[in-house]
Amino acid sequence: MEKLEIESRENRGLWRERAPSLLREDEPTVARIVGTVGLAMALFGIMAIAVTAAGRQGPFGIGWGSFFLAWGLAGLLFHAAADKDLQIRRSYSLLGALLLIGGIVFSVIPFHEKTGGLFLLGFLCFVFALLFILAALRHETEELWRNRIIAVLGIAGAAAALTAFIGGNIRQGDFLHPYGVLLALTGIFYLWAFVGLRGTSSDFAYRTGQAIGLLGGVVFLTAFVRSFFAGYLVPTGFILMCLGLLYLASSVAICSDRPLIVLTRRELASFFYSPIAYIVLIGLACVAWVAFIIFLGDVIQGTVGRAMPMVEPIVQHYIFGFIPVVLLIFIVPILTMRLLSEEKRSGTLEVLLTAPVNETTVVLSKFLAALVFLVMAWLPWGLFLVALRIEDGKPFDFRPLLSFMIAMTFMGGGFVSMGLFFSSLTRNQIASSVLCFVGMILLTGLAIIKWNVEASSPASAWVPVLAHISYVELIYRSLEGQLQPRFLVFHLSFAILWLFMTVKVLESRRWS
Amino acid sequence: MIEVDGLTKYFGPILAVDDISFRVSQGEIVGFLGPNGAGKTTTIRILTSYLPATSGIARVANHDVMKESMEVRRAIGYLPESVPLYPEMRVEEYLLFRAKLKGVDRKARPSRLHYCLERCRIREVRRRLIGTLSKGYRQRVGLADAMIHDPPILILDEPTTGLDPLQIRETLSLIKELGDQHTILLSTHILSEVEAVCRRVIIINLGRIGLDKNLSELATEAALIVLEVRGPTENVTNVLRTTDGVADVSVKAMGDSLAGFEIRTHQDRDLREVISQRVAKNGWTIRRLDLVRRKLEDHFVNVVLHDEDGLAGQKLRAANQESHE
């Protein structure tokens, strides 16, 4: 066989390789149509709202106005994220900047002789400013512009966070709730974007990330110390401590280079690389919407039509019946099916496990990512209640929603780890999802057995046993606002068992 | 850097690697040759601590692959055969993710990334999704991943499969350049690749090492004199055997009183002239007289074809052992 001639490095420039799709750019036709329609809808919505706000009776009220505005903004965002054209991306950057300025103006101008009367509007402006800037930045290739825009994000985030915390510590109750909380959230989103876009390999962004953690720590400690004085803990101290912890956790999540955090970050991101995340989120939001409409009907009937008002906790009429159960049965297999089987099928598991990470870290990172996603997917349910609170103006007990979320974290941990185990058994996603689905059905069956046993022989010793291990019971109880640690501990140990077995399945290749 | 002693691996009843031992010292580029299914990938998976050995010891960078798996993994850069990558990630993002996972210091990360992008010539695709890349680019992304943490040892499992000839050439020249800073174990079944870049070759077949030599050693190995003579075969053989300096003669009858001879000589002496004189003196005619040095391919074929003997020998040994016990 002929000995291959080795080319010297100098000769290489003569011949260049082209990757396939470098030659043809996608034409953003659809995106442009969507963008144009979105612009028209947004303008129409703004006009409808403005006419109503000016006190005149237009053909469309605030409701239709906001409906058109929301869909218009969604269309514009889609266009901004899809179109690479120089003028278009600069226009969207400009729109983002204008929204940012608008947000600041709305936050400080007096309305009805009250400073910050339009703050909610300002907050929405902040959110959309960030979304538009991020969408436009996807395509911004010029370093100078990129750096400037990222710097603006950083400054805005730092300003919002500092205002929130300094103001929250000086003015306490009336400022913190709601302005301080919303400003602190704005701040963390902006700072997050800043650090993420710069990348933690850059020194400045890394220091910023650490500074976020430091700020969170200081806020937490201050609130903790001040909580020893009477009347501070509820609600001011509590809110500040939560925000401090949020900042601290964000800092760790962004900056840490520990394998567990690095892997969890990638897993969480990989949900959004595939359509799964969007399908689950949109599906849950739609179900929440339907449930909320039915719930609103009940509330109106309960308070107006009938003599008996609706009894607290009203939240259990919102997330009612079998809705959360059915959702869980479908969502858990979808979220967990590809976690390990995909890595097994494509062979990336070998690359992963020959890097210096052990099996436990890999399994835990996938578990955490799926669990965080599962719990976060329920947040839209809370947003609908915020709308009820703002529109109605009457306080109601929202705390069952918190206990529901906590219960969801523990139960979800059990389910996700079960799905993860099935996913570790096979390279076939469908097989693993079917196994997990069957598992979910069996777990749900426990509740049905419990009801049957209870109906036939209420005194049976099986009733408390089945009540203890049935997750459906836990959902109902948590929606009533009850949270008993012993039930949570059961689901926690359930999760640990599955996780342990998953680690063993991965390790079994090394057993001789 | 790599020490393997009596490594054996069974998959159930199937013997994949059979008692192999070899050493790779610092700075060497070693070609790990063998036909498909010879046990190359299994050996490599044991060396990267992905699979355990049934028996035997493997040490990489002075760490036992089973007991100090983490240290071993930190010391090696591994490119698996099929180059599995996450198709949904961008090249730069993927390499940074791997760098973090492999514990590359935060301050060193941008420069390592830059170095690997340049070295593997994937700078122009660093923002592209890995799933949209051609096979050649993906292979190089895998290579960049293997070297991102600047490991002392690189283990590359068939790094050139699926590349076009130009890409193969470039990849090989890159591997050769990397040989200055890394110890490299290059698994392949393509002989010319080994000849192009390696200083040493280990040929493995059916789980056993058939040859472990420096390429320079192979080049200077005793040459073979090939002779074709028309004449009485036995007489010719006798004459050749009695010639001074001849070590061994093998005969192959070619019919019509024509015979082929392969002659090995002591101390690599070139006896062509002596032989031609002696053959001519007896009145026989010479059809061919040549000095042949065995190429790597011949060694390879030799090792692979000798398997039958090897297997037979193995069975014999096993039978012997049983009868002794």
Image (cartoon, grey):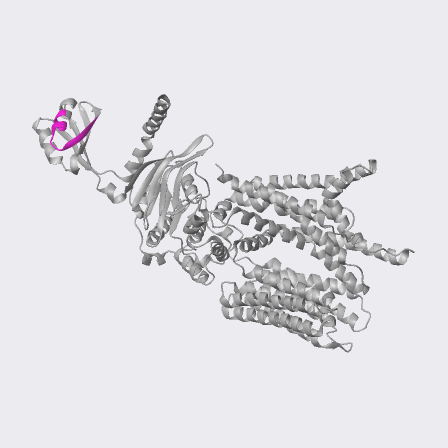
Membership of B250 in magenta stretch: yes
- The image quarter containing residue B271 is top left
Residue B9 spot, x, y in % from top left: 42, 35
The reply to whether residue A419 is in sight is no
Report how many numbered discs are placed on residues in the image.
0
- Left or right of A432, for residue B271: left
Q: Judge by depth and name the residue closer to the eye, A229 or B229.
A: A229
Quadrant of image for the N terminus of chain A: top left
Membership of A504 in magenta stretch: no
The reply to whether residue A505 is in sight is yes
Q: Judge by depth and name the residue closer to the eye, A228 or B190.
A: A228
- The image quarter containing residue A315 is bottom right
Whether residue A90 is situated above or below residue B196 in the rendered picture: below
Say which residue appears at 72% left-offset and 74% top-offset.
Answer: A116
* Residue situated furthest right in the rendering: A307
Say which residue appears at 68% left-offset and 47% top-offset.
Answer: A489
Q: Judge by depth and name the residue closer to the eye, A260 or A148.
A: A260
* Residue situated furthest left in the rendering: B281
Residue A372 spot, x, y in % from top left: 63, 53
Q: Judge by depth and name the residue closer to the eye, B296 or A390.
A: A390
Q: Specify the segment rendered in magenta.
A: B238-251
Whether residue A206 is situated above or below residue A287 in the rendered picture: below
Residue B28 spot, x, y in % from top left: 32, 48
- The image quarter containing residue A48 is bottom right
- Left or right of A253, for residue B108: left
Residue A316 spot, x, y in % from top left: 79, 52
